[in-house]
Image (cartoon, rainbow, N blue to C red):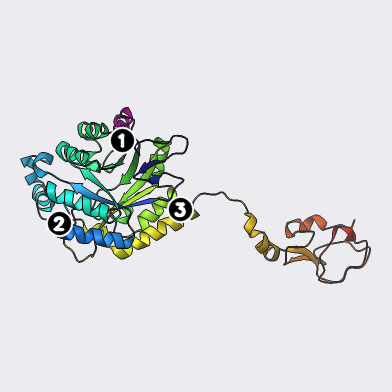
Amino acid sequence: MGKLNKNNLFFEIDGIKIGPKYSPVVIAEIGINHNGSLKIAKELVDSAKRAGVKILKHQTHIAEHEMSKEAKKIVPVHTKENIFDIIKNCSLSEEEEYELMIYVKKKGMIFISTPFSKEAADRLRNWNVPAYKIGSGECNNYPLLDHIASFGKPIIISTGMNTIKQIKKSIGIIKNHSVPYAILHTTNLYPTPDHLVRLGAINDLIKFFPNTIVGLSDHTVSNHSSFGAIALGASIVERHYTDTMNRVGPDIICSMDEIQCKDLLNGVEIIFKQRGGSKKPVKEEESTAKFAFASVVSIKNIKKGEYFSSDNLWVKRPGTGEIKAENLTDLYGKIAIKDIEKDEFIKKKNFK
């Protein structure tokens, strides 16, 4: 479904509802972790299926259309090769990627991808993919973003390396095409050190883009950031995925394996149930309050006509007495109108 429900903030990708009132969505990104091998890509898919993944994301690269020859001069800090050769060597052909998509669908998962060029986007459109993921590098690639938004399908857009001003322009382009969207906070370092995750940016996205579905694309080496994002209100978390951390590739270090993925899927459900609410007692606590709270009791025998004071009154559990602990000092100076034995609840009919 490519339509945003404005009354209850959500949109759907092949039947999966995405929004604050629904279970958070975990996107497992195999990306280029297959190193250009369809065989390995299928092994990653098999592993993701075992982990319980519902949405699997690929990266659609056509190096010659994506980058100019100048890219051969750029070597990312976390690799030893230039970015052109990395992408060229890690890309699947059109036929291979199509076979991968069909394989993902046969496994009962949803296939989406990030196109890095107009030609890549058109390839995915021809295959009728249900949604598009926009990487942080394309967040301010307004011509490409406008082209993809014109397809009328939901867009999930990462916003790393971009300012609020740049993101607003991106969102404006998407809105012009009336397609549903979600925005993800991201730090584009592989891996991202803890002090640069900046989960406060989730709050910024909620503040500057009200009534917008937000999430996190997590490039750390654990699930902690993703859990934190869910607690802050994220509806989507995305992590790179591999079947084993023993594989080689530029994104393996910040990928989750099958065990971590299962933990993430389980954890986001737990935190989703835990988040929200307000600071007040809940009805279910009443039985606990009966024994946990305290009531005013006599701490010695009190004769009729004696004044109540700290010498003869104190507070003890349980909290089932008439006079609660918080009202102890209100009784000081009152007069007992009957004899009261030691260690009895003080009742309103006992004094004046």
Q: Residue 112, can we see it?
A: yes
For the residues bearing labels 3 and 2, Cβ distance under 8 angstroms: no
- For label 3, the crowd category at 10 Å Cα-Cα, with few meaning under 14, some 14 to 19 and many 20 or more, is many
Measured in 3D between alpha carbons, the distance from the residue under mark 3 to the one under mark 2, in whole angstroms, is 35 Å
Q: Secondary structure at mark 1?
A: helix
Q: Is residue 345 left or right of residue 159?
A: right
Magenta span: chief secondary structure: helix
Q: Please state, as top left, top right, bottom left or bottom right, where the C terminus lies in the image.
A: bottom right
- Local crowd at mark 1 within 10 Å, few (<14), some, or many (≥20)? many
How many residues crowd mark 2 within 10 Å: few (<14), some (14–19), many (20+)?
A: some
Residue reaching furthest top? Answer: 176
- Marks 1 and 3, how far apart at CA: 27 Å
Residue type at tag 1: Ile
In the image, what residue type sits under mark 3? Phe
Q: x, y (%) of residue 123?
A: 17, 40
Mark 1 or mark 3: which comes first in sequence? 1
Position of residue 96 in the picture relative to residue 20 (left or right) = left
Identify the residue position indicated by label 1 in the image.
167
Mark found first going from the N terminus, 2 or 1: 2
Q: Position of residue 311 (x, y in %)?
A: 81, 67
117 to the left or right of 325: left
- The residue segment tinted magenta is 169-180
- Residue situated in front as seen by the camera: 306 or 341: 341
Residue situated in front as seen by the camera: 120 or 16: 16
Circle nearer the viewer, 1 or 3: 3
Q: Earlier in the sequence, mark 3 or mark 2?
A: 2
Q: Which residue is mark 3?
A: 272
Q: Secondary structure at mark 2?
A: helix
Q: Quadrant of residue 156?
A: top left
Could you tell me if the residues under marks 1 and 3 are in contact, i.e. CB atoms within 8 Å?
no
- Of circles 2 and 1, the one toward us is 2
Image location (x, y in percent) of residue 232: 43, 49
